[in-house]
Structure formats: C-alpha cells, structure tokens
Amino acid sequence: MIVHAMTFISIFTTQPPGGEPAPVPPPVIQFHADCQHATYATDQLVCSVADLKTLDGALAQAFLEARKLKGAGLDAGQAAWFRKRSLCAFRPDQEQCTRKSYLNRIRALKRLQRR
C-alpha cells in the first residue's frame, strides 16, 4: 500500500523536463459572460438560457453607460460583482441566484447613472 501511494505521489509531483512547472495564469478579468469562450460554469449557464443571456446583454449595456459617466473606477466593482455572480455555480438554485444577481447589478448600475 505504501509503495502504491509513493508511486501516486511521485507521478503528480514530478517536474516537467527543464525545471520548474509553468505557473498557472490567473483567471481573465471579465465584466459579463463571455459566450465565445464560456469556461466558468455560470457563464455556460448564462449562455445557454435565453433570458439570462438577455440579462447579460442588458448588464453589459448598463455597465458601459455607467462607465461613460463615472469612469474606469467602476471596473473593480464590476469585476467583484462578476466573481460573486460566479459563486452561484455552487448553489443548488444556480439559475435563480444568477438571475437575481444580474437584476440587482443592473439596478445598481442604473442608479449610478442617475446620480
């Protein structure tokens, strides 16, 4: 049993030829779903459910309009929202969670536009 465990460990800890393994790049910063390259589970859901895809388009438009008025300072908040929205993938009510997240963010962006 110990020999098998050691073999298993050595298989997964062996360095590639030439030294250090390549570092894993951080996730790409997104402000809304990328249906061309949907890698996140929530992006895949958004891109496959018509009303969520429509909400994603409305969010992208609301973000662009708010950004024109308020500037690039909104980028960090939008990226934070995106990460939080992506956590819906771990909930049993993923679709409902995602929908609510979009509706709340669109509402918040529209409020920013009125200030």
Image (cartoon, grey):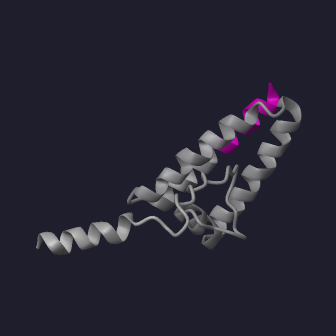
The answer to which quarter of the image holds residue 39 is bottom right
In the image, residue 22 lies at what x, y percent?
A: 57, 59
Q: In this view, does 94 lie to the left or right of 11?
A: right
Q: Position of residue 49 (x, y in %)?
A: 61, 70
- Residue 98 position, x and y percent, is 54, 55
The answer to if 26 sits in the magenta stretch is no
Considering only vertical position in the picture, is 101 above or below 38? above
Over which residues does the magenta segment extend?
A: 105-115
- Where residue 81 appears, as percent x and y from the top left, is 61, 42
Q: Which residue is pictured at 18% across the width and 75% down the height?
A: 4
**For the stretch drawn in magenta, what is the main secondary structure?**
helix
Whether residue 10 sits left or right of residue 80 in the image: it is: left
Q: Which of these two is toward me, 81 or 17?
A: 17
Which is nearer the eye, 48 or 29? Answer: 29
- From where the camera sits, is residue 90 visible? yes
Residue at far top of view: 115
Q: How many discs mark residues in the rendered view?
A: 0
The residue positioned 83% from the left and 45% from the top of the image is 64
Instruction: Name which residue lies at 68% across and 41% down.
Output: 78
Q: Which residue is drawn at 55% across and 61% down?
A: 42
